Amino acid sequence: KAGVTQTPRYLIKTRGQQVTLSCSPISGHRSVSWYQQTPGQGLQFLFEYFSETQRNKGNFPGRFSGRQFSNSRSEMNVSTLELGDSALYLCASSLVSGPAETQYFGPGTRLLVL
Amino acid sequence: SQQGEEDPQALSIQEGENATMNCSYKTSINNLQWYRQNSGRGLVHLILIRSNEREKHSGRLRVTLDTSKKSSSLLITASRAADTASYFCATAGHKAGTALIFGKGTTLSVSS
């Protein structure tokens, strides 16, 4: 079975621009979660989507949004980029939504905002 | 905000030695999980221990959980150079959904 894939792997943007990142979960997995990883703040939960509905949301501004499609693929969007948005963005999929579900992480998208 | 805090932040050992990492957390949990990350890449799930379990083993990994102290430890026995990575504990709460709260991690370096 193919693992979680994320595209693009690397991205360079300038302040004020917007960006869309994509995540394809493992086949059959219906839950997709997004995390931001920075050296200063570590790994922080952004949001989770399950069956096209946002299930949980972390403490991030409204500039961060996401969605999930009927095939469980997910996208996250960051509008009006700031320098502090430079990070590794990781998505993770699990079979269903639940606290004891094993999450399988993708390789991440490294975003650099200049 | 971080739920888990790992200790130590960095650990350097020789191949064949054991490595112990500790994690403390603040609130009640459903379970605690350990992940490994190699060089800023994706995370790999290692082991999950539920709040009603005290110890769990998986290969060379041994995890303990003390809910009264809100702490967990990960022991890697007979370390190998390939174990060089960052290790994170993550806690899952009781509400619905799959959100994990991660600690800042322990960087393990195993030299041959």
Image (tube, coloured by chain):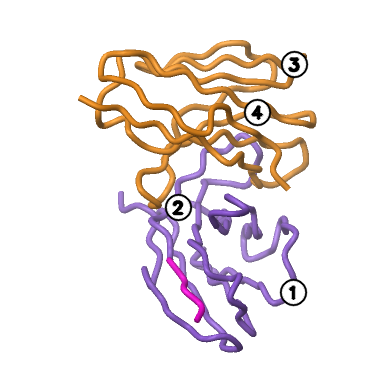
Chain colours: A purple, B orange
Three-letter residue code for mark 4: Asn
Most common SS among magenta residues: strand
Q: Is residue A75 above or below residue A33?
A: below
Tell which circle, 2 or 1, labels the residue nearer the N-terminal end. 2
The label shown at residue A28 is 2
Q: Secondary structure at mark 4?
A: strand
Q: Which residues are magenta?
A: A110-114
Per the image, the residue denoted by label 4 is B31
Q: Secondary structure at mark 1?
A: loop
Pointer 3 chain? B
Per the image, the residue denoted by label 3 is B69
Question: Is the residue marked by circle 4 packed among few (<14), some (14-19), or many (20+) residues within 10 Å?
Answer: many
Q: CA distance from mark 3 to mark 4?
A: 14 Å
Of badges 4 and 2, the one in the foreground is 4
Per the image, the residue denoted by label 1 is A62
User: What residue lies at 73% left-to-right and 37% top-to-bottom?
Assistant: B93
Q: Secondary structure at mark 3?
A: loop
Residue A27: in sight, yes or no?
Answer: no
Residue A36: in sight, yes or no?
Answer: yes
Pointer 4 chain? B
Is B2 included in the stretch rendered in magenta?
no
Residue nearest the viewer, comparing B103 with A79:
B103
Q: Give residue B23's position: percent from left, percent from top.
A: 61, 26
Residues marked 3 and 4 touching at CB (< 8 Å)? no
Three-letter residue code for mark 2: Gly
Q: CA distance from mark 4 to mark 2?
A: 24 Å
Of badges 1 and 4, the one in the foreground is 1
Q: CA distance from mark 3 to mark 2?
A: 38 Å
Q: CA distance from mark 3 to mark 1?
A: 36 Å
User: What residue lies at 44% left-to-right and 36% top-to-bottom?
Assistant: B107
Same subunit: marks 3 and 4: yes
